[in-house]
Image: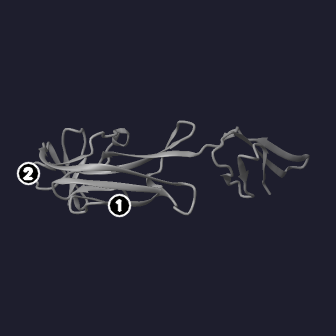
Amino acid sequence: HTVYTVTVGQEYANVSSSGLVTVNTAGKSGPVNITVTFPTYTEAGALSAIMPAIVAVEAETLSLFTTPYPAYPGSSTSRLSAATLNQLACSGGYQWKSLVAKLRLTDGSEVDVTSAISALDTNNPGIVTVETGGVVKGVSAGTGIISATFGDSSTSLHLKAATTFTVSTAAVAVSSITIIKDQTAFSGPEGGPYDTVK
């Protein structure tokens, strides 16, 4: 069977018999080398390999931003700075946007943790709502705060972030209409079919 061994950095991480690496330190980071050995790979003897060094890092901050909804090619990289949901011209409905959660690590990198968010909430559901998948919907004119939680309050990894959304009656132009299953998508000035109403 395959054997995993931490040969450098035992103070930073452990590796299970199945190869799962877990960080075992708080407030510290450093290199970790893991040797993977296949004892019966050849008749001549064991074959082993050393994995590239792993640097243990910790979660630092959680941040939220929005992208167009529904998604279109390239929209996942379009961070929308304005958390405004405008009314759609000639429709009576409001824009929808996708909420994206990014976890900043101590090495300066970012990880998309949207699918791992443990809780999403709104302080004003009569103005703005948020679904489990992170779709934010305008309901009526006003402002509301959407908050997100990553991790578990019973552990040391428990971060929260919030962003304020303004739902505005200022109408955005509609340049095309596309039927997507049971939804209607309106294309406009942000470059793609980002606005949706039922």
Above or below, 76 relative to 184: above
Separation of disc 1 and disc 2 at Cα?
Answer: 30 Å
Q: Are marks 1 and 2 in contact (CB under 8 Å)?
A: no
The residue to which callout 1 is attached is 121
Q: Secondary structure at mark 1?
A: strand
189 vs 161, left or right, is left
Q: Quadrant of residue 183?
A: bottom left
Residue 134: image location, x then y, percent: 36, 56
Mark 2 neighbour class, 10 Å CA radius: few under 14, some 14 to 19, many 20 or more:
few
The residue to which callout 2 is attached is 90
Would residue 70 be visible to someone looking at this image? Answer: no
Which of the image's four quarters has the C terminus? bottom left
Residue at x 25% of width, y 56% of height: 137
Residue at x 19% of width, y 59% of height: 139
Q: Amino acid at mark 2?
A: Cys
Residue 67: image location, x then y, percent: 32, 45
Above or below, 80 relative to 151: above
90 vs 31, left or right, is left
Q: Secondary structure at mark 2?
A: loop
Instruction: Return the residue nearer the eye: 89 or 125.
Output: 125
Q: Quadrant of residue 55?
A: top right
Would residue 125 be visible to someone looking at this image? Answer: yes
Which of the image's four quarters has the N terminus? bottom right
Whichever of labels 1 and 2 marks the residue nearer the N terminus, that label is: 2
Residue at x 38% of width, y 59% of height: 120
Mark 1 neighbour class, 10 Å CA radius: few under 14, some 14 to 19, many 20 or more:
some
Residue 192: image location, x then y, percent: 25, 42
Q: Amino acid at mark 1?
A: Asp
Instruction: Return the residue nearer the eye: 53 or 149.
Output: 149
> In front of the other: label 1 or label 2?
1
